[in-house]
Image (spheres, rainbow, N blue to C red):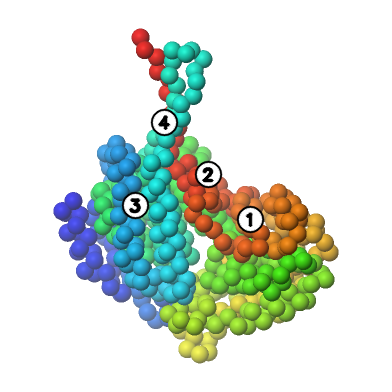
Amino acid sequence: MATTNVLLNEQKENFQYGSTFKNYINGEWVPSISGEISPSINPGNIQEVLGYFQKSNVEDVQAAIKSAKDSFLAWSKTSVIKRGDVLFNLIYLLEQEKEELATLITKEVGKTIKAARLEVEASIQALKHFSGEANRLAGETVPANDPNTFTCTIKEPLGVVAVVTPFNFPLGIGIYKIAPAILAGNTVIFKPASDTSLVGVKTVELFVKAGIPKGVLNLITGPGSVIGQEFSDNKEIKAVSFTGSSEIGIALGRAVTSRGAKMQAEMGGKNATIILEDADIEQAVKGVVTSGFINNGQSCTGTSRLIVPRSIAKKVTELLVKEASAINVGDGFAEEVHNGAVANEQQLKTYLHYVKTAIDEGATLEYGGEKLTDLNREKGYFVSPTVFSGVNKNMTIAKEEIFGPVVAVMEVENYNEAIDLANDIEFGLSSAIYTNDLEKAFYFIRQIETGVTHVNIPSNHYENQLPFGGKKDSSIGPREQGSTALDFWVETKAVYIKPY
């Protein structure tokens, strides 16, 4: 443990913007075998390099896997209560470093400091939930056919597992995956998004400070194609938990499951919100703004399709444009700002591509649709909240995930058509309806084909005590969080006992 502390301090001395950060393998901060590094930049000011990170190759991944494998037996035999102590310690550390963590998130993701603080707080609440699960890692006893036989089940860890996280909630999603994985007794290879490697490094440092033994948690940074391929192929990896695009997640899932390992993936969404005539329309539109525009729409559960009866479509569109035009976009550290920059250049290009495609296909641009370069925004990836009307189900903007602050207004004749349109999509992550008709609300809950749904609440709302996941091309495997948080990370052994 003393050696680990020395190495941790060694890394922390270099924890300043612009430094070169290393991988964390077997309790040591080490450079990649390739010797190559790549930068992470501030999307709000692309002239600011936040740090340089290891461009790892297959040999680096294999070294991390060996470290995790060598540590598995001891960690799996450690009392689950003691494993839970790491999470309890981590709660305190996150509380102590809230503002530093929020600052890192704002700088590396581009979101506002207010949104970053909310992410840190959500991570703390998740840890409180996960740490309590240590007392509930239990099997069951069941009656046997022979009354002299005792039968039960026990839960056992899988072994070495891999965690792959996205850029949009780099601290939160990392913790949502790593915490239950290690609590269950697994050892972990953690691959953060390249755009948020700095938050990934900080996350691992905090786990080390919380008391995680060497080899139990390993960090690898670098290209997803290289690292992901080894996760797919290496038989020592018993499970992969991934959050990202459906295209990558489905391909990774096929490769992982084809060799008998487990796969959990939370992927894309093209989430619909329905507003009915009897709703409080002003409040409903504010809910769409929260889920569709705030955080630049960079939430997999955010609303991107707004479905409304034709009779109120004009009023809803006008209100939505009014709210969109009031969103202040700029430096994420300014308290009066609602949206900072989008996360990277690719997100900017994707946003501009879909805006152009929507216009070319005949949708009406009601507001936004541009990169913002005035008011000191020329150095960052700032975009305008965007509203389209006249969108039909055959348009690209109605079918493909944009992951940006773009809401497409789609008109229907009646309630049943609204539900049919909401379901007519390959994704099935989240949804919402605004109505004061209880019968229609419950019918919607039963009929909507999503894993998460809301009534009179924005589609991106979530709480840690409920399971999270989708249907169709939005998810693979058991749900994250809630009462199902440990399901993916363990396997069940059936036990039969009979005395001689």
To which quarter of the image does residue 134 belong? top left
Badge 1, how many Cα within 10 Å: few under 14, some, many 20+? Answer: many
Q: Which mark is residue 453?
A: 1
CA distance for labels 3 and 2: 22 Å
What amino acid does circle 4 point to?
A: Ile
Instruction: Give the residue drawn at x 53%, y 89%.
Output: 374
Check disc 3 and report the residue beneath it: 87
Contact check, label 1 and label 2, Cβ < 8 Å: no
- The residue that mark 2 highlights is 478
The type of residue carrying mark 2 is Pro
Task: Give the residue at mark 4.
Answer: 154
**What's the residue type where badge 1 is placed?**
Thr
Left or right, 273 with respect to 164, comes to: right
Helix, strand or loop under label 2: loop
Label located before the other in sequence (1 or 3): 3
Q: Are marks 2 and 4 in contact (CB under 8 Å)?
A: no
Above or below 160: residue 49: below
Relative to residue 142, is residue 159 depicted above or below?
A: below
Cα distance between the residues tagged 1 and 3 = 29 Å
Q: Tell which residue pokes out farthest to the top in this image.
A: 500
N-terminal of the two: label 2 or label 4?
Answer: 4
Q: On residue 239, which mark appears?
A: none
Say which element carries label 3. Answer: helix
Nearer the observer: mark 3 or 2; the answer is 3
Q: Amino acid at mark 3?
A: Leu
- How many marks on residues? 4
Relative to 483, say whether 34 is above or below.
below
> Which label's residue is closer to the chain start, 3 or 2?
3
Q: Secondary structure at mark 1?
A: strand
Closer to the camera: disc 1 or disc 2? 1
